[in-house]
Image: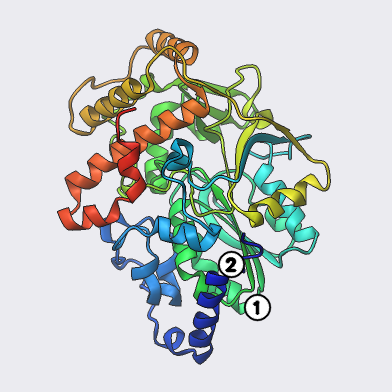
Amino acid sequence: MLIHGHHPRFTSIVATATKVSSQGQWRDKAKPIESGSMYPAKENCSSCGLCDTYFVSHVKEACAFLGDSNIMTLEERVHGRQRDLDDPDEVLFGVIQETFNARVDPPIKGAQWTGVVTGIAVEMLTQGKVDAVVCVQSQEEDEFAPRPFVATCVEDIIAAKGVKPCLSPNLNVLATVEALDVRRLLFIGVGCQVEALRGIQPYLNADDVYVIGLNCTDNGERESLSKFLNAASEDPDTVTNYEFMPDYRVHLKHQDGHYEKVPYFCLPAQELSDVIAPSCLSCFQYPNDLADLTVGYMKTPYDSKTPMNEHFQSVLVRNERGRELLDAIRSVSKLESQPPYGHEGLLKRQSLVVQTVVADDEAKCGEGPTKGAPRWLGEVLAWVLSGLGPRGIDFAKYSIEYHYLRNYIHVMRHWNGKAAEKHIPEHHFLVRKPK
């Protein structure tokens, strides 16, 4: 069992890396990629920030989009074991120690949800369990533009609350982490960032690293976000955050606090076919398999009477460090929890997956409807699917299977054959097997 990252195998790797890093040779010789230059993963780069630092020396072994998929190898290093490929839940979600739904009560003011991630980060810092937290604040001139930050006080963590739905270079602050001599670090990030962090973690001058992972999919550049908001909202300039929710609608929160709810089917799919970054279309880290604790919405039963900032989220504990993260907020009685729930519904999940992928692919190829569905029809479709389709854990399974199948098609279509075979993780082939 892993405690504080000191699994025997991991400890030996850290010891070896520490010996190498103490010589300082690779740091001195490293040449971070210059701004505006092509990154090693080229068009598939997710701008995670790794190559902006001297850790670029290890990009070939760490990058989520270069070489062989090493998700399951890293699982064993991080969690003490790989996922059980005979367990259908672990095939989809990764290593599971415990899973449930949770919310902070009362919610943290200004949080996109209730502040589960923010609350844990605050407690880990104030209780002295970590020295700093890598989080993402907003650029001063643009609240949607990400600004990775090494937070060493509660105010800096609170300033990072809310999601920035753009590609973000979270790892470009790793050199700052080392310069500040941070020995106990909490890192908050999405799947591609976490995978790269795990790849270079043996070389990082830190004693303990905790990771909170966010469920993440379908991001893009800041300009693409503007294009999406302009198409989705009647008043895009006042949108403060948004989420694709399990009621088959996009919930957009506005500055005055009201929510605009737009059925997926009303979005102009062809017009928006280019807003998702190629890296996100090539990603198999939606569940954030390598985090100690993963937080997101997709396994939580949707309650239409509860606004997003009061709603439960799903929490998945993967190892003992993940349990420590939870214990930090539980110790101050801020976390309300409920058991997980799933409902298959009357509509067969696999049929929904295939239909969704086909509709997406038609839009990508310039086929199908040129505009979104009329609002009345979109509302009817969302109502029917919410009532008859999968809910809770089963909705999450639908979402993962859809994204993995869509991304598999993209990789096989656009990547070199050998590179595609290396990139696709082993468990993905079990996901694609008919149930």
The C terminus lies in quadrant: top left
Q: Depth check: 276 or 299 in front?
A: 299
Q: Work out whether residue 160 can be spotted.
A: yes
Q: Nearer the viewer, residue 112 or 355?
A: 355
Return the residue at label 2.
7
| Residue drawn at (47%, 49%) of the image | 83
Residue positioned 28% across, 20% down in the render = 371
From the viewer's perspective, is residue 378 above or below residue 213?
Answer: above
361 left or right of 224 in image? left
Q: Which residue matches tag 1?
A: 181
* 403 up-or-down from 22: above or below: above
Q: Secondary structure at mark 2?
A: loop
Give, as a three-letter code, the residue at label 1. Answer: Asp
Choose top left, top right, bottom left or bottom right for residue 149: bottom right
Q: Quadrant of residue 125?
A: bottom right
Taking 118 as reference, is 243 left or right? left
Q: Amino acid at mark 2?
A: His
Q: Earlier in the sequence, mark 1 or mark 2?
A: 2
The Cα atoms of the two marked residues, 1 and 2, are separated by: 23 Å
Identify the image quadrant of residue 269: top left
Kindly state the secondary structure of the residue where label 1 is placed: loop
Q: Is residue 280 visible?
A: no
> Vertically, is 373 above or below 15?
above
Viewer-nearest of discs 1 and 2:
2
